[in-house]
């Protein structure tokens, strides 16, 4: 292994700049994580402080030391030993000397690098890195500064860490700045900091900073961290997602960046669906999730991030309208935008593909022109469905909890409004549920009962769960049941085509969304069963 000084750039290029974070409470679990992580990347941070006691740390380091002479993959790997104390945001109960002792043991086990917090250096004799070097820690020191609360208003200049040690000549091999980003502006300041020199690691922490963690390597950060298993800091993306879904190590200035904005956003399947499409088509592009509390923060960051377009979900579908230069006429009629294209001059142009999702989901199953379709619900989803079906030539009927809202939507789309009690006798070609009733975690509820389903097709715009209670009731009556996942994928494919100007790989996009939803439902069932079993044992 070459020395840090002889390698020039920090970690070289490509995959080696993705650093897997391995953290577990016992040595066997730590070993398993490390072996699996090395299949994904040659650079690994070993969180020794997560091991629950000194015995587990000793056992793991003994195994690591022996493994370096037996395992070829170990000899090609770069290990960063970290044993962060509680004071520095870690789990080690001990003082600075205890931390240095474990880092020295990590060096004996073959670790070339160590992460040393500025808080530890300030407690060493002379507040100098030389004291750490005298303690025989790994020779290449990554000096880290963490702020888990905020991004400092003023970031230190590149010599600040050296000045803090009072020994400018004892400079670290690299510097890491990790700070909680409350806004995208905070995160972008960290990424700009990384561009000042080669051996700087910038880590925007928190969910707001998550998309910028994915873009960090493209922006010039020497490393991007990703946990192999359990997250060790807020806003982390798993190693598998970072490498296989977002392809963070492959992104460059030519990469086209898209995203989805919302609040909340962690549940969104749009990044999974869109990125799967880019991978299927071999496009140099990434689709990122943006938690947006305030639109002005996001809008101000569009240019620097280089966004080409973005999807819009709640609560921004209406408020984004006032920031658009142009808006598709149908989207304006609906009063909501879910897709925005960013032109080269930075101007924003809005569209609504939700209505396409409705049409593409129903057209294979029925003739829309001259059909009679009931839309149950008069909110945003109901408006998109109403205008879509009216434009397709259907006779639209609206029923909603608030009859006044139903009448208003009916007037706007040229349809009719009926009260709830009329559903017992009225017949339709199709019924669409545009309310959230029946959505997880209230999956046992249905917005309509069996006596109100006089139709040939029932479509639920909800897709969590895949088979809602409403769809179960419809199927029992021999009615064609259409899951909301059909609309979700269809509207997403329409967005994809607006963004890329090429046909969407809809088959692959649907398959990955279905797998994710099915896996989520299986996980929920297992969790419920486990919880029930525990309660039963408790009662016994």
Image (cartoon, grey):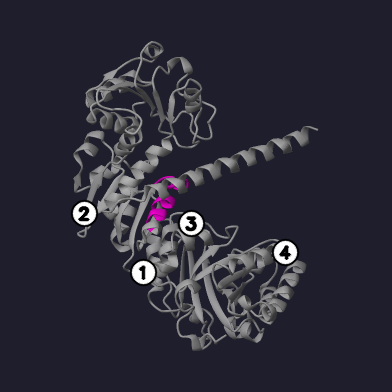
Q: In front of the other: label 2 or label 4?
A: 4
Whether residue 392 appears in magenta in the rendering, the answer is: no
Separation of residues labelled 3 and 1 (CA atoms): 23 Å
Residue 9's place in the image compared with 391, above or below, is below
Residue occupying the point 68% across, 71% down = 95
Residue 300's place in the image compared with 447, above or below, is below
Separation of residues labelled 4 and 3 (CA atoms): 30 Å
Of mark 3 and mark 1, the one earlier in the sequence is 3
Q: Mark 3 points at which residue?
A: 206
Separation of residues labelled 2 and 3 (CA atoms): 29 Å
Of mark 2 and mark 3, the one earlier in the sequence is 3
SS of the residue under disc 3: loop
Q: Name the residue under label 1.
A: 252
Residue occupying the point 47% across, 27% down = 471
Q: How many other residues sit within 10 Å of disc 4, few (<14), some (14-19) or many (≥20)? A: some
Q: How many other residues sit within 10 Å of disc 1, few (<14), some (14-19) or many (≥20)? A: some
Which of 502/117 is in front?
A: 502
Name the mark on residue 28: 4
Of mark 1 and mark 4, the one earlier in the sequence is 4
Of all residues, the one furthest to the right in this rendering is 540
Tell me where the magenta segment starts and ends, as one range: 262-278
Residue occupying the point 48% across, 43% down = 514
Q: Is residue 184 left or right of residue 345?
A: right
Residue 54's place in the image compared with 406, above or below, is below
Q: Name the residue under label 2.
A: 347
SS of the residue under disc 2: loop
Residue occupying the point 30% across, 33% down = 384
Q: In which quarter of the image is residue 306?
A: bottom left
């Amino acid at each position: 292994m070459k020395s840090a000084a002889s390698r020039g750039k920090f970690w070289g290029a490509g995959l080696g700049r993705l650093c897997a974070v391995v953290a577990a409470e016992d040595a066997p679990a730590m070993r398993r994580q490390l072996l699996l992580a090395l299949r994904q990347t040659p650079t690994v941070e070993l969180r020794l402080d997560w091991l629950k006691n000194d015995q587990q740390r000793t056992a793991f380091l003994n195994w690591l030391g022996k493994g370096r002479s037996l395992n070829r993959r170990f000899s090609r790997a770069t290990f960063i030993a970290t044993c962060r104390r509680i004071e520095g945001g870690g789990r080690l109960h001990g003082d600075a000397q205890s931390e240095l002792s474990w880092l020295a043991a990590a060096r004996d086990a073959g670790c070339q690098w160590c992460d040393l917090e500025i808080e530890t250096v300030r407690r060493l004799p002379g507040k100098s890195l030389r004291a750490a070097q005298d303690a025989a820690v790994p020779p290449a020191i990554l000096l880290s500064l963490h702020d888990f609360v905020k991004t400092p208003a003023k970031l230190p200049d590149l010599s600040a860490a050296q000045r803090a040690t009072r020994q400018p000549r004892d400079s670290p091999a690299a510097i890491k700045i990790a700070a909680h980003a409350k806004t995208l502006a905070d995160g972008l300041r960290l990424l700009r900091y990384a561009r000042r020199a080669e051996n700087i690691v910038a880590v925007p922490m928190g969910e707001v900073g998550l998309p910028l963690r994915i873009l960090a390597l493209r922006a010039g950060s020497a490393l991007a961290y990703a946990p192999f298993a359990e997250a060790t800091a807020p806003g982390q993306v798993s190693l598998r997602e970072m490498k296989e879904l977002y392809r963070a190590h492959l992104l460059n200035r030519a990469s086209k960046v898209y995203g989805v904005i919302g609040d909340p956003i962690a549940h969104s399947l749009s990044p999974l669906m869109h990125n799967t499409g880019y991978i299927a088509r071999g496009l140099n592009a990434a689709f990122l999730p943006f938690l947006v509390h305030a639109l002005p923060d996001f809008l101000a960051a569009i240019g620097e991030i280089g966004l080409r377009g973005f999807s819009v979900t709640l609560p921004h579908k209406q408020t984004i309208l006032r920031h658009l230069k142009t808006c598709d006429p149908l989207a304006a009629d609906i009063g909501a935008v879910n897709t925005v294209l960013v032109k080269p001059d930075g101007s924003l142009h809005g569209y609504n593909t939700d209505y396409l999702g409705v049409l593409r989901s129903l057209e294979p199953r029925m003739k829309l022109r001259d059909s009679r379709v009931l839309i149950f619900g008069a909110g945003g989803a109901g408006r998109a469905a109403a205008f879509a079906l009216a434009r397709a030539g259907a006779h639209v009927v609206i029923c909603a909890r608030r009859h006044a809202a139903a009448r208003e939507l009916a007037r706007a789309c040229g349809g009719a409004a009926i009260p709830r009690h009329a559903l017992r006798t009225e017949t339709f070609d199709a019924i669409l549920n545009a309310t959230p009733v029946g959505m997880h975690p209230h999956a046992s509820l249905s917005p309509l009962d069996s006596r109100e389903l006089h139709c040939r097709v029932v479509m639920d715009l909800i897709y969590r769960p895949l088979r809602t209670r409403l769809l179960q009731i419809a199927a029992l009556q021999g009615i064609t049941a259409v899951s909301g996942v059909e609309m979700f994928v269809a509207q997403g494919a329409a967005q994809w085509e607006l963004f890329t100007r090429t046909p969407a790989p809809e088959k692959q996009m649907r398959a990955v969304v279905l797998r994710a939803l099915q896996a989520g439902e299986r996980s929920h069932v297992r969790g419920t069963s486990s919880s029930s079993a525990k309660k039963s044992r408790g009662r016994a």
